[in-house]
Image: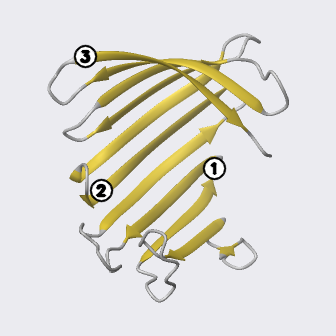
Amino acid sequence: MTLTPENVSFFDQLQVSLFESGAKDLNAEILDSYSFRVQKKLEGVDFEFSRIHLGNRYPGATQVADDRTSVGFLYKGEEHSVWGEIVYLDKNPTYGNSRVYDLGASFRVASFGKAVLEYNKVEDGEEHFIVGYELPEWAKNLVVAPEVRYVTLPDGSKDTRVGLRVAQKFS
């Protein structure tokens, strides 16, 4: 279900989903998971609030319910973008009760594409500093971006990871 500004004047968009969390059982009697997302644009900045609850009422469930709540923003200008997000994890199977932080920026470099800088950290977990470069579009709406991640692991050791991000935009 998606509500638009015509339906709800305060939000630009509201999305709600109900779903089962048991794998491959197609048992619609146990809709024990949900998610929702609220988006609003104010003064050229997109704000988003979302929540997901992954239930555990299906037969054979071995873990507790997993809840995630996030608050984020995105400013997209002609020459640069800035974004940030905080995700609150509650009873997460991997990270327990913790927070995840993400902050980034991109800016046009002459006419040769965009430089991207991003920082993200899982509380008591990995910390990443990412340097990337979005190449000029090779095809309509296709983004190719090599990146280097400088990672600090929870034990304090360091790692460097090189990757390639490819994204197809559909709008």
N-terminal of the two: label 2 or label 3?
2
| Mark 3: few/some/many CA within 10 Å (<14, 14-19, 20+) | few
Residue topped by disc 3:
158
Q: Quadrant of the N terminus?
A: bottom right
Tell me which corner region of the image, top left, top right, bottom left or bottom right, holds residue 67: bottom left
User: Which three-letter amino acid code belongs to the residue tagged 1?
Assistant: Glu
- Residue occupying image coordinates x 43% and y 54%: 71
For marks 1 and 2, give the CA distance: 29 Å
Residue topped by disc 1:
43
Q: Is residue 108 visible?
A: yes
Which mark identifies residue 89? Answer: 2
N-terminal of the two: label 1 or label 2?
1
N-terminal of the two: label 1 or label 3?
1
For marks 1 and 3, give the CA distance: 40 Å
- Residue occupying image coordinates x 25% and y 16%: 158
Please name which of the two marks, 1 or 2, marks the residue nearer to the observer: 2
Tell me which corner region of the image, top left, top right, bottom left or bottom right, holds residue 141: top right
